[in-house]
Amino acid sequence: MVVPVLLGELPAGQAAQMFTRLAPRAAPDPAKVAEVVRLAGCLPLAVSLLARVLARHRSWTLADLAADTQAGLLTLTAEHECVAAAFEVSYRLLNPAARRFFRLLSLHPGATTDAWAAAALAGVSLAEAVGLLDGLHGEGLVTETGYRRYGMHDLLRRYARNRAAANPDDDREQALDRLFNYYQHTAVRAQARLAHRPRPGPGPAATRAPLAAPALDDAGQALAWARADRDCLLACLDHATRTGQHARITAMASGLAGLLRSDGPWTDAITRHAAAAHAGRHLGDRLGEANALTDLGDARRLTGDYPGAARDLEQALTLYRDLGDRLGEANALTWLGDLRRLTGDYLAAVRDLEQALALYRDIGDRLGQAAALTWLGVVRRQTGDYPAAVRDLEQALALNRDIGNRLGQANILVHLGDVRRLTGDYPDAARDLEQALALYRDIGNRLGQATLSAALGLCGG
C-alpha cells in the first residue's frame, strides 16, 4: 500500500520547477510562479495542489491563483497554514456533492478505501462513488494507493474532518453507521465462504444490506476481498471496541475469523476473539459468546496453547448445549476432537468426532459431516488404521466435491496423500498432494501452499 507522507519545505527554485512541471503554462512568468510557491510555503503538497488548480482552470491567471491563496491565508491560523490555504482553494472549486463526499471520506477509520465502502459511507450509488473518487483524485485531494483504491494525506484528512465537524448537514453518525453496516454485512458473507463449517446464529440477512456490495461468489473472491480490506476491517473493529459497540464487536470479529485463521497472526486472532467473547458476555448474547469462544479456542489451538484451547471450547460446548444449538454443539465437538488428537488422547478424539458426525447427519449439514470425517480419518491414520483412514477421508472428499468446497478438498487430499505415503504408495501420494497444491493456489490459501512443499518432497514431488 502506498502511504502519502508530508515532505519538508523545498528550496524555492525546486518548488518553482515542480510547479511549472505540473502547470507548464505558468513557465513564462517566473516572478508570479515564485510568489505562488512562496504563498504555498514551498511545501510539495501545497505546491502540487495549486499547480493542479491552475492546470485545470484555463481561465485563471497566476495572479488569480495568488489572490485566492492569499485570501485563504488571511483566514487561517492552522499549524500548517500554507498547506491549508492550498486546500481551501481546491475545496472551494468542488461542487456541493463532491465537497460533502470529501468531508465524509475523511471519517473512514481506515487508511484507504475502495468505491464500495465509499458508496456506503456517503449513501450514494457505486457509480456515483466511482465518479466522485475520480474527481477528487483529479484534484489531488486523494491518492491512488492501488487499483481503484484510494487514500488521503493525513493533513487533508484533518482538514476535511474539521470541515465535517463544522457542517451539521453531514450526518456523521449515520455515515459511519452505513459504513460499519457495509463492512459487517460483507465480512459475514465472506466468512460464510471461508468457514470450515456453517456458524450458528444470524447470517448476512441480520445486517441491513448496503446499497452495493461486491459479489464474493466463491472462497477465492471472499479471501481476496478480505485481504484487500483487512486493515479497514480491523480499524472498524478497533473503533467499535473503543466506542463500546458490543454487538458490532461480536459480529465483526466473527466475520474476520476465516481471514485471521488463514493469514494470521494467530496471536492477533486471540486478542480479537477474546474481546468478542467478552462483548457477547456483556450483552448477555450467549450464542455470540459461544461462537467467539469457539473461534478463540481454534486460535489458541493453532498457537499450541492446548490447555487454553480446551478451556475455551468446553465453555462454548456448554453454552451451545444449554441453548439447544446442535450445530454449535457439533462444531465445538469437532474442534475438541481435533484438539484431543493433538494431545494424543485418541479414544476421546474419536468419541467427540463421532458425536459431532451424528449431530451433523441429524441436521443435514454436509459441510460439517465432511469436517468430522476428515478429522476421524486423521485420527485413524495416526493410530495406524490406514484402511479406515482412507475410507473416512474419501467420504469427506466426496462430500466436499458435491458442495463445491475447494478448501476442504485440498485439506483432505493432503491427508490422503500422507496416508498413501505411509503405505508406500508414493505415486498416488504425490498425485493427491499436487492436486491439493493446485487447489490452494487457485483459492489463494497461503498457509496450505507453505506447508505442502515439505510433504511433496517426502513423496519425491
Image (cartoon, helix red, strand yellow):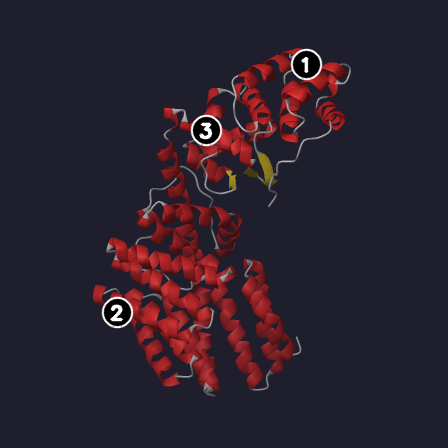
The residue that label 2 is drawn on is: 318
- Number of the front mark, 1 or 3: 3
The residue identified by callout 3 is: 162
Q: Quadrant of residue 455?
A: bottom right
Kindly report which numbered mark, 2 or 3, lies closer to the viewer in this rendering.
3
| Of residues 407 and 298, the one drawn nearer to the viewer in this rendering | 298
Q: Is residue 185 left or right of residue 144?
A: left
- SS assignment at label 1: helix
- Residue 21 shown left or right of residue 102 in the figure: right
Type of residue at label 1?
A: Leu
Q: Which residue in the structure is indicated by mark 1?
A: 62
Instruction: Report the Cα–Cα distance between label 2 and label 3.
Output: 50 Å
Residue at 57% x, 22% y is 85
Can I make out residue 128 in this image? no
- Total marks shown come to 3
Badge 3 amino acid: Asn
The x, y position of residue 295, in whole percent, is 38, 63
Q: Earlier in the sequence, mark 1 or mark 3?
A: 1
Which comes sooner in the sequence, label 2 or label 1? 1
Residue at 55% over, 79% down: 418
- Between disc 2 and disc 3, whose residue precedes? 3
Residue 458 in sight: yes
